[in-house]
Image (tube, coloured by chain):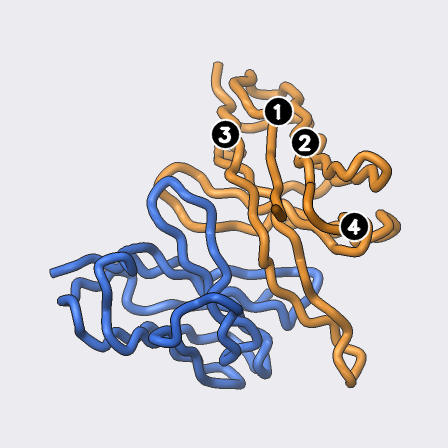
Amino acid sequence: EVQLVESGGGLVQPGGSLRLSCAASGFTFSSYWMHWVRQAPGKGLVWVSRINSDGSSTSYADSVKGRFTISRDNAKNTLYLQMNSLRAEDTAVYYCARDRGYYDSSGYYTSAFDIWGQGTMVTVSS
Amino acid sequence: DIQMTQSPSSLSASVGDRVTITCQASQDISNYLNWYQQKPGKAPKLLIYDASNLETGVPSRFSGSGSGTDFTFTISSLQPEDIATYYCQQYDNLPSYTFGQGTKLEIK
């Protein structure tokens, strides 16, 4: 079964750090780009970060740039999100998602988040 | 940055109704748009990719259309299990992936 399972969420004080993990199974993890998407309580989906298949390229939303670091260990089939200098506004459910995109005939990378984890809750509060 | 504007933000309809949600991009995004369904307490699920392609295993009552700046998501005959929040997402402006604000669909 194709599956993503997040862990590592919890309660942390403002300014603190947390590392989220996303364990992948049932597919060739090293072949896919991966993402983190978050959702604050009662709010919509917000893309956070992306990493390419071999980990050589990453990108971030402006709201987390310089504070969050995405990484992956293809030998362990695991995606990570290191979150530093956490703020109250980072409080959210964090989802990891697989991107089954590909480069089309014009060389453009098409994207679709086709597999999602169940999410892990991060609460930043004193 | 590309902004995605979904409307309506909420919608109440009866079982069997045809339901339409629109998503407007702030600039031309070709067909680089996906639609997701999120049921309460659950992770999102991909329904439509590249504006009009139905994801494998998704019922055919769901469809998408549009290109450029204006997109439409349609449920041809609303079923009780379709109660959820629906999001559009653009991926034209990589590496930024912007979601719409969501449309909450309820049964009347």
Residue B22 in sight in this render: no
Left or right of residue A124, residue A57 in this image: right
Residue A121 numbered mark, or none: 3
User: Which colour is chain A painted?
Assistant: orange
**Chain designation of label 2:** A
- Check the rendered structure and report the hue given to chain B: blue
Q: Is residue B58 left or right of residue B30?
A: left
State the mark number for residue A21: 2
Subunit bearing disc 3: A
Q: Secondary structure at mark 1?
A: loop
- Foreground disc of the pair 4, 1: 1
Horizontal and vertical percent position of residue B65: 44, 83
**Above or below, B16 relative to A78:** below
Q: Earlier in the sequence, mark 4 or mark 1?
A: 1
| Mark with earlier residue (2, 4) | 2
| Of callouts 2 and 3, the N-terminal one | 2
Dividing the picture into quarters, in which one does residue B14 lie? bottom left
Q: Residue at x 60, y 36 (%)?
A: A5
Q: CA distance from mark 3 to mark 1?
A: 9 Å
Question: Pointer 4: what residue?
Answer: A58
- Mark nearer the viewer, 2 or 4: 2
- Looking at the rendered image, the disc whose residue lies closer to the viewer, 2 or 3, is 2
Instruction: Name the spot of residue B25 as percent of width and height, x first.
Output: 49, 74
Q: Are marks 2 and 3 on the same chain?
A: yes
Question: What amino acid is at disc 4?
Answer: Thr
- The residue that mark 1 highlights is A8
The x and y percentages for residue A103 are 77, 74
Give the Cα distance between marks 2 and 4. 16 Å
